[in-house]
Image: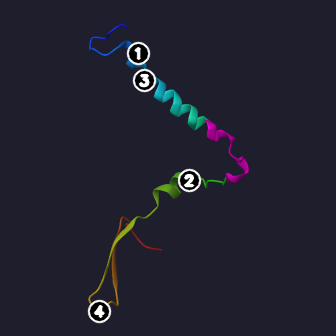
Amino acid sequence: MTRSPSGRSAGFRFVPLLATVALLSACGASENLDLERHVTRDVPQYTLDQFLTTTSMGGASFSPDGSKILVSSNQSGILF
């Protein structure tokens, strides 16, 4: 058998290739699943203005007596 520079026989170079082919073949077998189980849904489309006016909220903390909550956001300007 032919030896590679690393000292292993040339046949061992194909083991990773064969393992990859076997894994991909196994993954292809899942194509026969019942397609009716997959549910499609409409994805809402937003305008650029709607996208840019989103507000992120975070950092909720209660006051010591529990009557108030403090949050932080990236909203600025006049609240409507």
SS for callout 4: loop
Q: Residue at x 41, y 15 (%)?
A: 11
**Range of magenta residues:** 29-39
In the rendered view, how is the structure colored? rainbow
SS for callout 1: helix
Q: CA distance from mark 1 to mark 3?
A: 7 Å
Q: Which residue is mark 3?
A: 15
Q: Going by the image, does 77 lie left or right of 36?
A: left
Number of marks drawn = 4
Q: Nearer the viewer, mark 2 or mark 4?
A: 4
**Along the polypeptide, which appears first: circle 2 or circle 1?**
1
Q: Please identify the quadrant where the N terminus is shown.
A: top left
Q: Are marks 1 and 3 in contact (CB under 8 Å)?
A: yes
**Along the polypeptide, which appears first: circle 2 or circle 4?**
2
Which amino acid type is marked by label 2?
Answer: Thr
Q: Are marks 3 and 2 in contact (CB under 8 Å)?
A: no
Q: Are marks 1 and 4 in contact (CB under 8 Å)?
A: no
SS for callout 2: loop
Q: Return the mark for residue 27.
A: none
Q: Are marks 2 and 4 in contact (CB under 8 Å)?
A: no
Q: CA distance from mark 2 to mark 4?
A: 42 Å
Q: CA distance from mark 2 to mark 1?
A: 58 Å
Residue 2, horizontal then vertical, whole percent: 36, 7
Which amino acid type is marked by label 1?
Answer: Gly
Q: Going by the image, does 64 lie left or right of 49?
A: left
Q: Which residue is mark 2?
A: 47
In the displayed image of the protein, which residue is found farthest to the right? 36
Q: Nearer the viewer, mark 2 or mark 1?
A: 1
Which amino acid type is marked by label 3?
Answer: Val
**Along the polypeptide, which appears first: circle 1 or circle 4?**
1
In the displayed image of the protein, which residue is found farthest to the front? 1
Q: Which residue is mark 4?
A: 65
